[in-house]
Image (tube, rainbow, N blue to C red):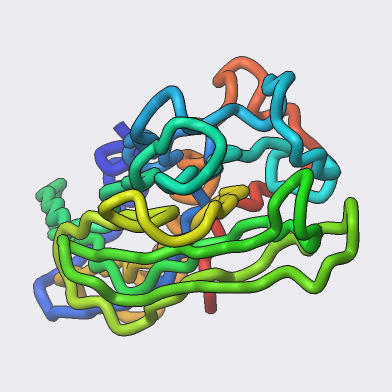
């Protein structure tokens, strides 16, 4: 485990108990097709037959540029109301649980360390079709957090056939309280009413404060340890997302775990 390893690595420090704390703001990017690199939790899509893997879909009318999508993947979901020429789908939902508050503590030699994840924000990104038909470019998304309505995104397309807008922030919330949260993106409306609408879901980002608290005499040493631990923690989360045998051979720094100064 990373935490015991980090603590043992600095156990030679002769520390006494004076509390010191530092928080690191971390952004975690969750791709539409991969689990959370920090917790392993997936995004759940319902109804399963209404959502399509954009890369593998052979009957989707949306033909986005995969190179413009995060990790070159996306989920394509079309809501058909009762007045459409196809059977109604009912609302399409994409659900994800995130953040939480996890407290870790350990005692090694004369060092006491505690850490916890405190969720603070979430950002949701989609591609948007600018066509009126083939594919439909009308967007009608509603957002819920912990079963409470928190926002809506609606856009009528300008009619630029075959054109798309990428990396569109369709929802953001930066005032979340600490604790476990359940987020849901809903495409369409209850009761099979309204208009046909398309969602091209790309990825989401959530933020949390990774907090450390120590007991020791030398504040400078702990601050240096924090910055070292921040780098190792970032690499660890990156490697959860990739093959452990190859992750250290990458020439690129991880982009899905970004500590903020």
Q: From the viewer's perspective, is 113 left or right of 33?
A: left
Q: From the viewer's perspective, is 135 left or right of 224?
A: right
The answer to whether 34 is drawn above or below residue 136 in the figure is above
Of 20 and 30, which appears nearest the observer?
30
Of 214 and 165, which appears nearest the observer?
165
Among the 4 quarters of the image, the one containing residue 82: top left
Quadrant assignment for the N terminus: top left
Among the 4 quarters of the image, the one containing residue 77: top right
Q: Residue placed at 29% from the left, 76% from the top?
A: 150
Q: Residue placed at 48% from the left, 43% from the top?
A: 80
Q: Residue placed at 27% from the left, 69% from the top?
A: 211
Measured from the top left, where is residue 76 in percent x and y?
60, 39
Q: Residue placed at 28% from the left, 43% from the top?
A: 3
The answer to whether 44 is drawn above or below residue 259 in the figure is above
Residue 36 appears in the figure: yes
Count all numbered tags in the image, as a single digit.
0
Measured from the top left, where is residue 16 in percent x and y?
13, 70
Of 63 and 28, which appears nearest the observer?
63
Measured from the top left, where is residue 255 in percent x and y?
65, 52
Of 157 and 120, which appears nearest the observer?
157
Measured from the top left, where is residue 113 in percent x and y?
18, 59
The answer to whether 24 is drawn above or below residue 126 in the figure is below
Instruction: Kindly give the residue lying farthest to the top in the view shown.
Output: 245
Residue 6 appears in the figure: no
């Amino acid at each position: 485990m990373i935490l015991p390893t980090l603590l043992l690595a600095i156990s030679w420090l002769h520390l006494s108990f004076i509390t010191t704390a530092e928080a690191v703001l971390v952004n975690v990017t969750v791709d539409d097709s991969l689990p959370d690199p920090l917790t392993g939790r997936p995004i759940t899509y319902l109804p399963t037959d209404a959502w399509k893997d954009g890369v593998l879909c052979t009957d989707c009318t949306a033909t986005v540029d995969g190179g413009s999508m995060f990790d070159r993947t996306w989920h394509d979901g079309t809501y058909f109301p009762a007045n459409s020429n196809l059977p109604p789908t009912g609302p399409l939902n994409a659900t994800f649980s995130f953040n939480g508050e996890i407290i870790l503590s350990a005692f090694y030699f004369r060092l006491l360390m505690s850490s916890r994840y405190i969720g603070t924000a979430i950002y949701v990104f989609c591609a948007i079709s600018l066509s009126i038909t083939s594919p439909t470019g009308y967007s009608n998304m509603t957002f819920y957090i912990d079963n409470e309505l928190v926002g809506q995104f609606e856009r009528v397309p300008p009619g630029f056939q075959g054109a798309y807008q990428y990396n569109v922030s369709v929802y953001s919330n930066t005032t979340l309280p600490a604790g476990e949260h359940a987020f849901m993106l809903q495409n369409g409306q209850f009761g099979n009413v309204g208009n046909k609408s398309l969602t091209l879901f790309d990825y989401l980002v959530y933020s949390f404060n990774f907090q450390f608290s120590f007991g020791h005499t030398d504040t400078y040493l702990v601050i240096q340890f924090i910055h070292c631990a921040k780098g190792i923690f970032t690499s660890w989360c990156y490697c959860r997302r990739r093959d452990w045998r190859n992750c250290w051979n990458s020439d690129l720094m991880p982009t899905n775990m970004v500590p903020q100064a």
